[in-house]
Amino acid sequence: MSFVECHDEPIHIPGSIQSFGYLIGIDAASHEISFFSENITGLFNFSSPNDLFGKKISELPEIFRSISQSDIFRNLEYHTRRENETYFDKIQVGAKNYHFSVFRTGENVFLEFEEVISNPEKRITNKYDNFYIIEDGEEIWNQLLSTLFKIINYDRIMVYEFMSDGSGKVIAEKTNNNLESYLGLHYPESDIPRQARELYLKKRKRIFSNVHSDVVPILSRKPDLIDLTFAGSRAMSPIHAQYIKNSGASSSFSVSIIIDDQLWGLVTCQNVTPKHIDLEDRVQAGIFTVLASNAFSSFKSKKELEYRVNLSDKVASLKSDFLRYDTLQESLSENKEKIRKLIEADGVALVYDGEIIVEGNVPDREAITNISEWALNNFEDNVYISRSFLKDFGAELMLDESCAGIVIYIIDSSKKELLMWFRKEFDEHISWAGNPEKKIEKFSENGEERSMVSPRQSFEAFTEDIKGHSKRWSTRNEIAIQAIRDIILETSHKQYSTIKSLNDQLRKVNEELDSFSYTISHDLGTPLTIMKLNAQMLLNGMKNAEDNQKKKLKAIIDEIDSMADMMHDVLQLSKAKHVDIKLEKVETEQIIKKITDNAKMSFGSDKTEVEIHHLPEVLADKTMIHQVFLNIINNAVKYSAQKDAPKIEIRGEEKEDKIVYTISDNGIGIPEASRERMFKIFNRMDNAKKFKGNGVGLSIVHRIMKRIGGNVEYVSSENGTSFILTFQNPKVLSLV
C-alpha cells in the first residue's frame, strides 16, 4: 500500500480525463495515433478502439472526416510549431457541435473535444472598459466578479489572493445570496499545494464540471502516463475532488491571476450542483481576468510611482539635513524622528560608541543592548527584518510588546554601530475558513490500495489569535530602509573625506606646534636662567631693603621657576610624541622608590606613608616610563600632602596578558566634571588651584602610555584617587 501526500501527488498525470471531454493523442512526427480516451468510441462511430493505434487521422476518413476538414487540423504543422500553444475551432459530429482544441506538448499533439453548451443567460456589457479608469484595487476585483457572474453564473465566485507566507485570503466575493460569505477568510497553504500552483501558472483556466462523475481512462500503447498539464479536460486528483465535496460544492472553475509573471491569486468559482461552462465562456472569463489583472498591475505601478516620488522628496530633505552635521552620529541623532517615520515604525534606537539614543516607543536600554549583542553575534547580513521578533526571541532577550517587530541595520559591526526600528505587538485575529487539520484516508486506484491525506472536513469560520507579532513590514518599508542606508553610506563617505582633510590639516598644525614648542622651550631656557640669576643677585644685595620690595623680587623668581617648569614639561610632552622609543623589560622598583623619596622631599611631606607592594617587570621605554611614574607619583604626594595622615599605595599585578599598576592616594580627589578633560594639556582642576602646577603632567603620561602600547585611566572620589596604568607583559611577548 502506498501513501500520497498533498504536495507529492502527481496531478499532471492522472491517467484519465473528465467525462465532458474527449481526447486523441498523435505522435508529433508521424501523426500516428498513440493514445486516446476510452469514451472516444461514443463520439466517433467505430467498434474496435484498439485498431486506432498506429493509424493516422487521414487513414480513417469516414470516422474522422469532421477533424480532417477542420482548418486547424489542415494546418497542423503551423499550429503545433510552438509547445503548449492552444488553437480552437468548432466541428460537427453527428447532429452536435463540438469545440475542437489542438496543442503540442513534447512529442505528442493533443486533439481535444467537448460539446458546445449554449448559455442563454450570458450578458456581456462594456463595463470591462472601466477596468483601467478605476482608482481602487478592491473595486477592480469587484468589477471583474460582476462581469464574470453574468458569464459563468456559478453560485459563488471569489478573488483569492496568495499571502507572502503561502496562505490565501478571499479579498472579493459575489454569491447568489443563498450562501454564507467567505469574504475575508484565510486558507492555509496546504489547501493549494506547490505542484497545483505550478500548474496554475501553466494552465490558467481549470474546470471540474462534476466531482461526482466517473473519470474516463486514457488508453495508450506506451507504458508511461501522459502529461495532461495543458488538457482542458484533465481529470482532477482524488484529494482535490474530496476537498470540493467537503466544501459543499459539486463543480468548480478557476482562472489564474498572473501579475509580473507570478501567481498572484485565483478567480475561484463554486457551484452547489454539477455544472459545465462552455469553452468559449471559459476563454472569455480568462480574457476578462487578464484585463483586470493588467488594470490592477497598472494601478499598483501608479501607486508605487507616487510613493517613490514622495519618498524621493523626503529622502532629499533628509540627506540635506544629514549633511548639516559634522559626524554621522550627530546626523542620525538629530534626525531620528524623520528616520522613524520614514519606514512607519513606532520607535527607533541608535546604538554607537556605547551610547543609546532613542525616539518613540522602544524597549528599555537593557533590551536594546541585548538585541545589539545578539545581532552582532548571530548574522552577517547588515539588515535583518522580522515581524515575529517578540514571539521568536522575547524570552531569550527579555523583550516586551514594544518590539514585536524589528528592523536592524548594522552600520559598522567593528564599531558596534546599529540602527533599529521597532513596531509594537499587533493584536491580530485571523479568520480561517475551517480547521485546516487533515486526516489519513484509504482509497483504491487501479486495483491498488492507497492512503492519502484527506482534505479537511470543516469549512466553518474560526478565529486564531496571533501573539508576538507586529504589523507586516511592507515592500515600501524595505524600499525606505534601502534609501536610508544609501543616505548613511553617502553621508559617511562625505564626512569621512571632510574629516580626513581636517585631520591632515590638524596633523600639519600639530607638527608645527610641536616644533614650535620644542624650539621655544629650548631657546628660552638660557634667558630665563639669566633672569633668575639677576633677580637672585638683586635680592641678595637688598639686605636693608623693605620687606615689600623683597617679596616682589621673590615673586618674580617664583614666576620664573613656574615658567621654566612649564617649558620643561612642554618639552617633555613634545619628546613623548617624537623621540624614538625602545621597548624592553624594565624593573620598576628602584625607579619608583627613588621618585617617591624625592617627591616627599620636594613637597615637604615627610609624614606621607608610602606602601609599595609587588612590582612586576613591564615592557616599556626606560626613559619614558620614568616620566610616567614621576608625574603620577608627584601628583599623588602633592595632592595628599595636606591630609592629616597622607598615604600612597603602589602595587602591580599580572592580569591575563597585561601588567596593571595601581597608584592610589587619599588626596583631594578629581571632580566628575573634570573627567572629560583630565588628560588634556594645561588642564587644572578647580579644587587644585592652591597647589603649584601647570596641567601638563597627565598629558605627558597619556601620550607616553599610548606610544608604548599601554593605557592610563583612573577612578576617583572625594576620599582620593587611583591611577591605573596598563602595560604590555614582557613574558607573554617573549612566548610569541
Image (cartoon, rainbow, N blue to C red):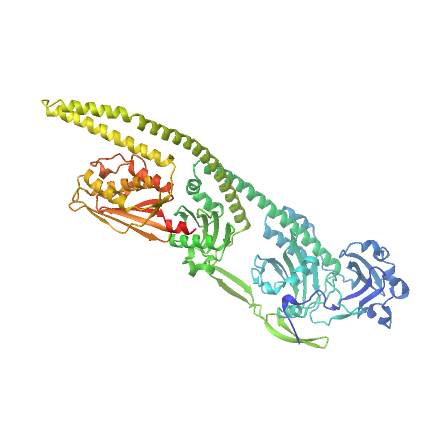
Q: Nearer the viewer, residue 168 or 586?
A: 586
**Residue 4 sits in which quadrant?**
bottom right
Q: Position of residue 713 (x, y in %)?
A: 32, 45
Q: Is residue 550 left or right of residue 259?
A: left
Q: Nearer the viewer, residue 186 or 703?
A: 703
Return the x and y of residue 628 as percentages of the image width and height: 30, 41
Q: Is residue 229 left or right of residue 485?
A: right
Q: Return the x and y of residue 302 as percentages of the image width and height.
A: 60, 45
| Rendered location of residue 11, percent (x, y) | 69, 66
Horizontal side of 80 relative to 343 (left or right) equals: right
Residue at position x 41%, y 57% in the image? 400
Q: Residue at 55% x, 41% y: name it.
A: 309
Residue appearing at x 21%, y 25% in the figure: 532
> Which image quadrant is residue 338 in?
top left
Residue 361 in view: no
Q: Is residue 524 above or below residue 458?
A: above
**Residue 513 seen in the figure:** yes
Frontmost residue, 143 versus 618: 618
